[in-house]
Image (tube, rainbow, N blue to C red):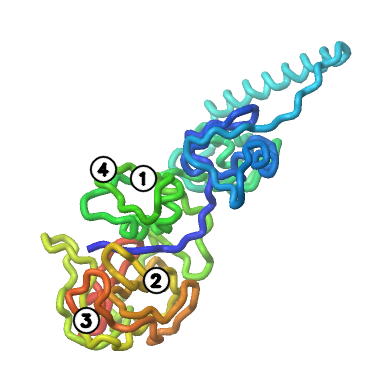
Amino acid sequence: MRNGLIAGVLLMSAPAYAAAPEDEKVHVVAAGETLGGIANRAKVSAGAIARANKLKEPYVVRLGQKLTIPREAKPAAKPAALAVSADTSAKKAARTASRVIEARTPPAGASSPETETSHKVLEGETLGGIAARAKVPRVLIAEANGLQPPFDVRVGQVLRLPRTRHHEVKSGETGFSISLDYAVAWEQIALANNLDPHAPVKVGQDLLIPTLLDPPTVGARTLTPPPRPVAAATPKAPRFAWPLSGPVRRGYDGAGSDYHDGVDITAPKGTTVRAAAPGTVTFAGREKDQFGNLVVLDHGDGWFTAYGFLSRVTVKEGAKVAAGERVGLVGDTGLAKGSELHFEVRQGGKPVDPLGELPKAP
């Protein structure tokens, strides 16, 4: 059984294969593109494009939609300016040749940015050369770092390199489970793929996973946190408290034929469900596929807990809760087999047996 919804702060940039509309008069919208991003690269105001295409607020564009890019007619070059124009063309050609050479022969000591998510600029490097070696379009790096024309970079400057990931949907997966595995909100994944966020995913479907560039400072999601040093002779202290008292009807099974991501704890309907540790509410509401009324808490360092099958949710998204604070009431919503709580623990997007992180008895 899989689930999850992780709220994230995403910088939505154009996909790696999107055509740069700097000189286009008509632009075909690619997956993940927004009107603002297209306008920025086209050097035309978003308002002008909206008016030219009769777009209505909130100015949402669709995958494959053809947008007219309004441009002013350029005046014909005057004879006296021909020599200057030729000189400018020569300089452009020289700069292009320089970028090609720099891309092929990076400065001594330069790291290969092919798999980097950030890159520190060295002496002699240019944005074009870094983009060529990173295999990320220059315009995407410029947008991700707020660079303005002529897109100069400084020695020592750290550039974020936005990368696009793909995921092939497997049997048993849902939008919620995929969003939890990648720590990216399902609404953002659906938007990047031009999908209805309420429609079920299909086995074999190839999903583009947007890059998380600016994780929140509170309860930041660390997908690969550093190991915690633990003395060999010191017994492991429980990380979480039991969310309520009651017998465990169904336990965790992460690899067997009866796959189950968490534990199901039976208790009378209306019993208070409490936060297992201090955290921030990243989801509080109805999950229609499996878990009914659901609450997800972010505890920092990549740790999350989830509380499903609730009869009522008593917290709101974005709220900070203390350990032991009420987050909901036991119910029988979703795929519950009776009055019970479905409780999950995840670390770095991976399910963890809750019993290994809880005291011995509820």
Q: Which of 259 and 72 is in front in this view?
A: 72
- Residue drawn at x 44%, y 79% is 315
Closer to us: mark 1 or mark 3? 3
| In the image, farthest residue toward the left | 257
- Residue drawn at x 30%, y 76% is 231
Q: Quadrant of residue 288?
A: bottom left
- Residue drawn at x 35%, y 60% is 180
Q: Residues within 10 Å of mark 4 (few under 14, many from 20)?
A: few
Question: Do labels 4 and 2 touch, CB within 8 Å?
Answer: no
Q: Which of 245 and 220 is in front in this view?
A: 245
The answer to whether any part of residue 232 appears in the image is no
Which residue carries the number 1 mark?
Answer: 207
Which residue carries the number 2 mark?
Answer: 285
Cα gap from disc 3 to disc 4, whole angstroms:
35 Å
Q: Where is residue 276? Give x, y as percent.
A: 34, 81
Kind of residue at badge 2: Gly
Q: Where is residue 12? Give x, y as percent.
A: 53, 49
* Chain-order first, disc 2 or disc 3: 2
Question: Do labels 1 and 4 touch, CB within 8 Å?
Answer: no
Which residue carries the number 3 mark?
Answer: 339
Q: Residues within 10 Å of mark 1 (few under 14, many from 20)?
A: some
* Chain-order first, disc 1 or disc 3: 1
Cα gap from disc 4 to disc 2, whole angstroms:
28 Å
Cα gap from disc 1 to disc 2, whole angstroms:
25 Å
Q: In which quarter of the image is residue 13?
A: top right
